[in-house]
Image: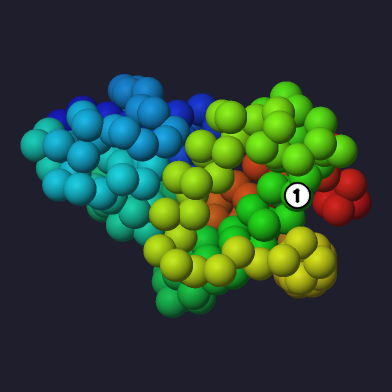
């Protein structure tokens, strides 16, 4: 099999999703660290202009978007299954919801003034322009990535994130994972926004209680 090369960076939530899947499937892989903000000349040259993280390299082929990467890894190593028999459609639907609705609510919540300050070493009581040149550059970069999608206000994000967490908790009543007794694509997609809250902005992690 052609070696798998993951282009990623350590604090990227979607990269964490793929790293866990690679571990679950016990696949050997190589690591290339990429910048977390533009410019990314090497990335853009390899991907033909795709700027998001991560992407998976298999030989001369580049696979962008973690939903596609999941399909590739499932083909390379079918077991344990990301899309179990009888749950192939449902696991994809829940994973898509988690990668979109859950993720964006979580990120809007995580990057509150307190969360942003913790990420970049500033003070939540001082405007970001005063303490965080790096944070300001990061915010501008991510604004471009949202392609005009407005950022959810903190109050709305908090309510949405709490509601989504409650739904996940209900799905886990009586079972270890979202769709049964083994992890599938839905679990990995739901996990990485929570991972970011817990490990990158722990000052905001009380919502996980």
Q: Which quadrant holds the N terminus?
A: top left
Does residue 162 appear left or right of residue 92 in this picture? right
User: Residue at image x 72%, y 66%?
Assistant: 153
Q: Residue 190: percent from the left, percent from the top?
A: 61, 57
Height in image: 161 above or below 49?
below
Q: Secondary structure at mark 1?
A: loop
Colour mode of the rendering: rainbow
- Please state the horizontal and vertical placement of residue 120, each as a whole percent of the image: 67, 29
Residue at (76, 40) in percent of width and height: 127
| The one of 43 and 142 positioned closer to us in this rendering | 142
Relative to 25, say whether 178 is above or below: below
Direction from residue 153 to residue 14 in the image, left or right: left
Residue 188 or 53: which is nearer the viewer? Answer: 53
Res. 182 visible in picture: no
Please give the name of the residue rendered at 45% of the width and 67% of the height, measured from the top-left corner.
Answer: 148
Up the image or down, 191 lies above or below 195; here it is: below
- Viewer-closest of 150 and 89: 150
Q: Which residue is mark 1?
A: 112
Residue at 55 percent of width and 45 percent of height: 139
Closer-to-camera residue (45/16) = 45
Could you say which quadrant of the image residue 122 lies in?
top right
Toward the left, the furthest residue is 60
Q: Residue furthest front?
A: 130
Q: Position of residue 28 (x, y in %)?
A: 34, 26
The spot of residue 35 in percent (x, y) is: 39, 28
Q: Quadrant of residue 36?
A: top left
Q: Is residue 37 visible?
A: yes
């Amino acid at each position: 099999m052609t070696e798998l090369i993951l282009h990623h960076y350590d604090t990227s939530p979607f990269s964490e999703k793929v790293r866990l899947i690679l571990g679950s499937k016990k696949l050997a892989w190589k690591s290339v660290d990429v910048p977390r903000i533009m410019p990314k000349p090497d990335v853009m040259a390899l991907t033909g202009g795709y700027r998001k993280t991560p992407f998976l390299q298999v030989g001369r082929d580049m696979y962008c978007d973690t939903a596609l990467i999941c399909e590739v890894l499932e083909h390379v190593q079918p077991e344990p299954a990301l899309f179990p028999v009888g749950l192939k459609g449902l696991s994809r639907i829940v994973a898509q919801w988690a990668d979109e609705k859950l993720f964006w609510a979580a990120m809007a919540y995580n990057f509150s003034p307190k969360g942003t300050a913790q990420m970049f070493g500033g003070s939540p009581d001082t405007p970001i322009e005063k303490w965080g040149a790096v944070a300001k550059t990061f915010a501008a970069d991510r604004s471009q990535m949202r392609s005009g999608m407005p950022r959810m206000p903190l109050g709305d994000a908090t309510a949405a994130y709490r509601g989504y967490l409650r739904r996940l908790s209900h799905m886990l009543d009586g079972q270890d994972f979202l769709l049964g007794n083994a992890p599938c694509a839905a679990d990995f997609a739901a996990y990485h926004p929570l991972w970011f809250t817990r490990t990158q902005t722990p000052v905001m992690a009380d919502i996980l209680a």
